[in-house]
Each structure stands twice: as C-alpha cells, then as structure tokens.
Amino acid sequence: MQSVDLVGLVENQRKFFAEGKTLDVKYRIQHLKKLYKAISSNLSLIHEGLKKDLGKSESESYMCETGLVLSELSYILKHIKKFAKPKRVKTPLAQYVSKSYRQPMPYGTVLVMNPWNYPFLLSIDPLIEAVAAGNTVVLKLSAYSPNTNQAIKTVLGSVFPEEYVAVLFGGSQINTALMQIKFDYIFFTGSKRVGQIVYENAAKNLTPVSLELGGKSPCIVDETANIKLAAKRIVWGKFLNLGQTCVAPDYILCSKKIHSKLVAEIKKQIVLQFGENPIENPDYGKIINEKHYLRLLNLLNPEKTAHGGRCDQAALKIEPTILDNAAFTDAVMQEEIFGPILPVIEYSNDSEVIDYVSGHDAPLALYIFSSNKKTIKKFTTTLGFGGGCINDVVIHLATSYMPFGGYKESGLGSYHGKTGFDTFTHYKSIVDKKTFIDLPMRYQPFKKFYMKLVRFFLH
C-alpha cells in the first residue's frame, strides 16, 4: 500500500470520527458485542493461523490468546458504561458554587502496531480498549504472522467498516510510511529498537504514545523456595510459545545453596511437560522464522548446556535448553533471549542480585520464588520493573483487573481493563460554575477584607 493510500485511509477515519458516532457508548457496545460473536464463531480459523505461524496447539492458542481476548471483551462490556460516564470530583471552597467533573473524551484516530509473538492477543486487546474508549483504529499487523493476520482481517472485516477499524499488512516500508502520518495516539508493542523509532517520529507531531517493549526479565530463586513447584512453574512460563514471550523468565538467579537441586528439578520438569524429545512433540510449537532461529543458535553454548540443545532447522525448533553456570559476560546475557534457552546463574547474597538487576535496563517483568517475606519485600520494593509475580511467572499479564506495562527502558504506559480504557482516553477537567451568585473577592480593586477571605478559602 502506497503512502498516499494511507493518508486517504486516515483521513476517512478522521471524517468518520468527526461524525460523532463513536461518541455514543451504545454504538461502541454494539460493535464490541459483534466482535465477541465474530471471534467466538471463528476460533478454528484463528487457531489454524496461530498453528501455521507459531506451531501453537489449540489449547495453548485458547489459553494464551483467544481466551484472554474474550475475557477482556467480557470485562470491558460489563464495565464500559461506568468507564464512559463523567466522573464527579470535589470542588474547592474557593470555587463556590460549582460542580467539577472529568469528562472522558477519545483521542480520535489511533494507530495500534502489534508484534508477531502473540499476534492475535496483542492486536485485539489494545484494539478492544481503543474502540471502547470511542476511537477509530488503524491496526498494523506484523509481517511475520501472515496466517493469523488473515484471520484477524476476516474477523474484524465482518464487524467494522474500514473507516472505523482498518487492518494493514506489510513490513518496514509500510511502517515507515505510517510514521510520516499524524495520528492522535500511537500504541506500539515490540522491540526497544523499533520502539525508539516510533517514539522519535511521534515526538515530531507531539503525538502521545504507549510503548510496550521488553527486556531481560530475571527469575530469582532463593534457598527458602519450594524448589519442585518453582521448577514446574518456571519451565511452563519460560518455554511457553518456545520462550517467545515478552514476560518469559529470561534467566534465573538462584542461591548457590539450592543451585544443583533447582537445575535437577528443571530438567525433570522439561521431560514431564514436553517429553523426552520435545522437537517431536506436536504441541511444542516453533520459532517464528529462520532469521530468529539462526539468532538463537548463536546464543547456544555446548560447553554450558546442561540439558537440551538439540535443534531442527527444517522445523524451526530448538528444544528446551538449560545453560548452567552461565556468566553475565556470556553472549546469551547481552540481549533479550526470546527463545527456549534458559541461563542459570548463582548468587551468594541478596546484594549481588540487587546490584546486577539495578545496574542494567529495567526489566518488563521480575519473578521471585521465596517463602521469606523479608526477602520478597526487599526485592519488590528495591528493584524497578514493570510487573511480576511472587512464586509464579507470567500470570500477572492475564488479568483485566491490573494494568500491564513496562518501566523505564521496558516500556511507557500500560493497558488492560480500566487502565486500557484510560490509555486511549483524554479526561477533560471541567468546572460548571453556577450563576445565581458571584463572589466579588477575585475582582479588582482588591480589598484587604476580601484578601482575608481569599486566604481563608485557599488554606
């Protein structure tokens, strides 16, 4: 699609927004209900796309993508009327007699750019919230997930006219063209490198943005942890979608007191969950493409491989791999892994953990396995991160009741549930001043008696 076509598409959305239809909450609800029905009716189509693109099983696709989207839709539909109402707030005595309130207002035409690793979830979740807030949406899908993209286009095309929600395919060329167009809000999920480009271009038009990025999310396991349960949950969260999850445990920091026991349990759990030969497991999934497969091969270190390491380039699969006694200087520790490779690093005391994590870019997620409340409090209050779990991994992402987002280098802004509605909403602060009385103290000429009243009112 050429740039001129994109300009026309966005202009049509602006005209549609200007008609005021999306300001009507009933109109939004009508389309969100249609969306719920369209997704429910096309689960097989969506799951087939996810299988072709990422090798996801039907169960994983529902648990981690379509099911979460339907849950978010249900939550939004249940609460949207409340979210969209003006919010009455207190009025200072100095503004007597008045009514003060915050009036929700959609931004207008927003751009949502999605990644390839959860191509359905991370496209439709922000779209739901943008529509619920009353915006029109241009949804730009990743070029790496073409089969899921087609399913998304089919589903959304049956619900929304293009002037309301438009779906775009394509790679860097179309991304570059979109960056030249002024939007009213940009919501981007992806890498830090591309996020910086989006941020720089948005700044030219003073366009507000949300950046959902990533980073190396640590998983801390101390000597008081339930080792068997920790291993079970870490293996599930790390190798879900073959590690291609922005909040996957990137590496383990474990107390040297339980290091050997933890590694042994992780090995057992890999076999229990994926079998003796995970590459042959039809539910194990695959790396998105050869480019990322080859990148991951360069991070493998046979000398430190304690489990796994076998690969199948034709199938784009790398089995769950443990790199034991990894070092902070290893190649695998220099970038977000985003694959089924799990480095394990020992620590001797809590200060080592705090110094390392605090000395690097703030992670999107952080996980702590411990039964020591003081240790948990120390890590959760001292370390900066987007969100996380205590004695579990990943699940903080799967709720409409808490915001999800990054911190510092791992992202800007957050979404899900009410927070997602707020992300795509500007709240206008309005004072409705009554006319039956007009206090004279604010007008010149100022009198000493009036100034005493002013001090009284303001303090």
Image (cartoon, rainbow, N blue to C red):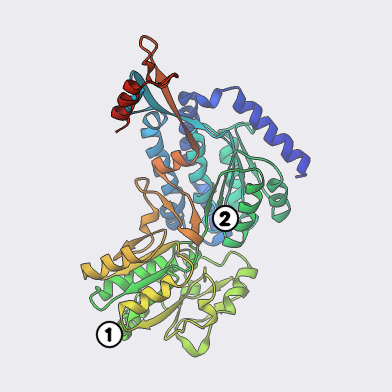
Depth order, front residue of 214/156: 214
| Residue kind at label 1, given as amino acid type | Lys
Give the CA distance from mark 2 to mark 1.
39 Å
Q: Is residue 61 visible?
A: yes
Q: Is residue 304 left or right of residue 401?
A: right
- Whole-percent x, y for residue 305 in the image: 47, 85
Above or below 222: residue 3 = above
Image quarter for residue 14?
Answer: top right
Q: Is residue 434 left or right of residue 246?
A: left
Q: Residues within 10 Å of mark 2 (few under 14, many from 20)?
A: many
Above or below 182: residue 437 = above
Depth order, front residue of 409/82: 409
Q: Secondary structure at mark 1?
A: loop
Question: Quadrant where the C terminus lies?
Answer: top left
- Residue drawn at point x = 58 percent, y = 78 percent: 297
Depth order, front residue of 170/313: 170
Which numbered disc flags the more N-terminal residue, 2 or 1? 2
Q: Secondary structure at mark 2?
A: loop
Farthest bottom residue?
303
Looking at the rendered image, the disc whose residue lies closer to the viewer, 2 or 1, is: 1
Q: Which mark is residue 22?
A: none
- Disc 2 marks which residue? 115
Depth order, front residue of 416/142: 416
- Disc 1 marks which residue? 257
- Residue drawn at point x = 39 percent, y = 40 percent: 418
- Residue drawn at point x = 34 percent, y = 66 percent: 382
Q: Is residue 271 visible?
A: no
Above or below 371: residue 276 = below
Farthest top residue?
436
Image quarter for residue 358?
Answer: bottom left
Q: Is residue 95 left or right of residue 108?
A: left
